[in-house]
Amino acid sequence: MSANDGKGTAAGGGPAAGGTELAGRLGLGTPPAGGDGTAAAEGGPRRKGPFFCGDIDMRIARDGTWFYLGTPIGRHALVKLFSTVLHRDADGDYWLETPVEKCRIQVEDAAYIVTAMRVEGTGRDARIVFTTNVEAEVPLDDAHPLVLRPRPDSGDLAPYLTVGRGLEALLGRAVYYQLVDLADIRRHPDTGAEVLAVESAGMTHYLGSPEFEDDRIAAGAGR
């Protein structure tokens, strides 16, 4: 994780400030200075479907930083605004899509980074709730499971949280440490192997073998 903790903030304006123009073109209500970036799509011409504007020079780096025209987007509220209209399709392409326009962007790893977690409730009613770098709160449950899959840069297995709209959030290293601390050893019902598991929202969520997780922590999981 970078020093900006995946929030995609940077000082100054320049090309990144042009993100406000892009937000207006997409028909998004641009957030006021210091706003929370949760404005709904508004304004702009309405069509029967979004106008396909092709590929734009926007990417989400593997540490969660959003770039526009090669420069980090300087306003976190603007990043949050864009994140509300981000989708991934069945082909794995990422889109900013509103009723006005549909533009393809690049994502190096996951769309989001999980930066915090907490446990709500006790016993079978307890659930783990994750917070992403755009302040979205996602419970660990049947609709939002954890998935272990290789990272595109290294091929190492890493934990990703399903967050909806085809998107995932990579668990940051500190959060992953917390999750492993909550886990205990269970026997996997499908393989019979001993694995680490956590309980959340009345379900058992399996992580990996204790030896595998020890190696991952030693190597720095979810950097």
Image (tube, rainbow, N blue to C red):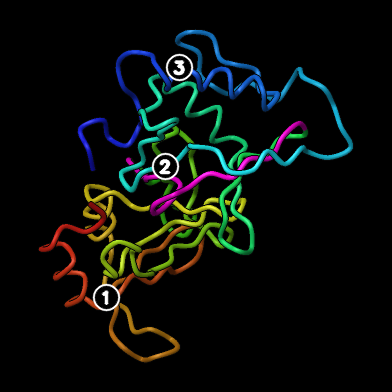
Query: Alpha carbon of mark 3 to alpha carbon of mark 2: how far?
Result: 16 Å
Label 2 sits on what residue type? Ile
Residue at far left of view: 218
Does 192 sit above or below residue 180? Answer: below
Residue matched to label 2:
60
Circle number at residue 115: none
Q: Nearer the viewer, mark 1 or mark 2?
A: 2
Residue on which disc 1 sits? 185
Q: Which sits in the foreground, 18 or 94?
A: 18
Rendered residue at 38%/69% (across/down): 148
Q: CA distance from mark 1 to mark 2?
A: 35 Å
Label 2: element kind: strand
> Which circle's residue, 3 or 2, is located before the other in the chain?
3
Range of magenta residues = 100-115
**Residue 222 screen position, x and y as percent:** 26, 55
Q: Is residue 218 magenta?
A: no
| Residue 109 lies in the magenta-colored region | yes
Q: Identify the residue at image location x=38%, y=20%.
A: 74
Residue ID for mark 3:
17
Residue situated in front as seen by the camera: 6 or 21: 21
By secondary structure, the bulk of the magenta-drawn segment is best described as strand
Nearest to the observer: residue 131 or residue 219 = 219
For label 2, count other residues whose C-alpha is less than 10 Å away and answer few (under 14), some (14-19) or many (20+): many
Residue type, numbered disc 3: Ala
Element on which disc 1 rests = strand
First in residue order: circle 1 vs circle 2: 2
Q: Are marks 1 and 2 in contact (CB under 8 Å)?
A: no
Please provide percent x and percent y for residue 50: 78, 38
Task: Assign a secondary structure to mark 3.
Answer: helix
